[in-house]
Amino acid sequence: MPTIFSKIIQGELPCYKIFEDEYTFAFLDIKPHNLGHTLLVPKIEVGDYIDVPEPYYSAVFQNAKTIGRAIQKATNCLRVGLVVHGMGVPDHFHLHLIPIFQADDFDTSKARSRPEEEMRMVQNQILVNLQRFSQF
């Protein structure tokens, strides 16, 4: 049975898409720690990052650099943190790119749904900045 991420990649479920290439797909988290929190996934279903084959593995982390720059510029955060915990969707590795404004921004109790207007706004800001920093 396909994971929720595979359904998003295939267009069966809606998302706030940020980026897509041959190996990866990135979209806004629907319960972000901070606005701009993005999930970056390989286009194959592999549960653990240590099992992700090449070239998918390298594509995830290479694209994280460019997408991270776009998130940082769009949100004016201090840094973009990376988290791999693998429990939210255990059958599909995903990399969290989280805008950090202060030390406790990785506190999972802060994650919450955001209004459609805010999600569209930050999606557009990241997309504009992704074009500026893009090597794709």
Image (spheres, helix red, strand yellow):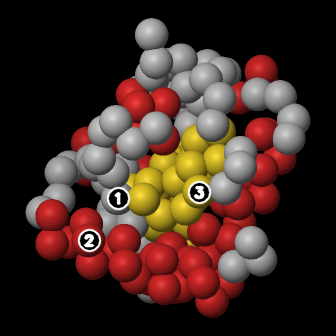
State the residue at coordinates (77%, 77%). Answer: 135
Of the two numbered discs 3 and 2 in the rendering, the one whose residue sits closer to the viewer: 3
- At mark 1, the secondary structure is loop
Tag 1 near tag 2, CB within 8 Å: yes
* Residue 133 in the image, given as x and y percentages of width and height: 67, 84
Looking at the picture, tell me which residue is in the foreground, 132 or 86: 132
- Disc 3 target residue: 20
Is residue 95 found left or right of 64 in the rendered image? left
- Disc 1 target residue: 16
- Residue 131 seen by the camera: yes
- Residue 60 seen by the camera: no
Q: Which numbered marker is on residue 135? A: none
Q: Establish if 58 lies above or below 62.
A: above
- Disc 2 target residue: 120
Q: Establish if 105 lies above or below 5.
A: below
Alpha-carbon neighbours of circle 2 within 10 Å: few (<14), some, or many (≥20)?
A: some
* Residue 115 in the image, given as x and y percentages of width and height: 12, 63
State the residue at coordinates (33%, 75%). Answer: 122
Is residue 69 found left or right of 1 in the rendered image? right
Q: Could you give the CA–CA distance between mark 3 and mark 2, rounded to whole angstroms?
A: 17 Å
Residue extending farthest to the top is 1
